[in-house]
Amino acid sequence: MEQKTKILAEDGKQEIKITREFELPLILLFKAFSEPEIVEQWMGTKVLKMENRQHGGYQFETTDAKGNVVFRANGSIHEFVPDQKITRTFEMENAPFGVQLEFLEFEPLSIDTSRLTMQVIYRSAALRDENLKLPFAYGINMAHNRLEEVVSRLK
């Protein structure tokens, strides 16, 4: 099956560019990244904090059936322009990749479709390459497919 989320990772650079066109109106795509209840549904994680404003922050956490934390991520929000863009840091705890800087841009393509473009910058090309060795493309495609499935029910 074709992967709808495209990833561009040029050799020797410390960034990746991620693009995806969604069968969702812009307002719903943006809500998928800014409303905790929706984020929890498509990401499959608990949103502990989400302060959608400049100098705000967020924190996600996933636990197993015994209550053990298996995933925790957090970051600071540097820019938040509704239905247009979010600039934030992202750090996954207990992972070797360090803090990433993410630029998320949202644009309408039609009344019913929109595009997400993400530029993710790592501290070094080596750290970026380590992240890409994981099933990164597969995982982000699955997450974006789930996002579209969950959010399309809100139409």
Image (tube, grey):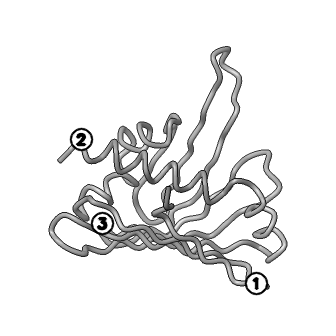
Instruction: Say if mark 1 contacts mark 3, CB within 8 Å.
Output: no
Q: How far apart are marks 3 and 2 (CA)?
A: 21 Å
Badge 3 crowding class, 10 Å Cα cut-off, few under 14, some 14 to 19, many 20 or more, is some
Q: Position of residue 150 (x, y in %)?
A: 33, 42
The numbered mark, 2 or 1, whose residue comes first in the sequence reads 1
Residue 82 disc label: 3
Q: In which quarter of the image is residue 88?
A: bottom right
Q: Quadrant of residue 89?
A: bottom right
Q: Position of residue 41 (x, y in %)?
A: 41, 37
Q: Distance between the residues labelled 2 and 1?
A: 39 Å
The residue carrying mark 2 is 153
Badge 1 crowding class, 10 Å Cα cut-off, few under 14, some 14 to 19, many 20 or more, is few
Name the element at disc 2.
loop
Q: Where is residue 100 in the image (x, y as percent from the top left)?
A: 67, 66
Q: Residue at x 48, y 57 (%)?
A: 56
The residue carrying mark 1 is 11
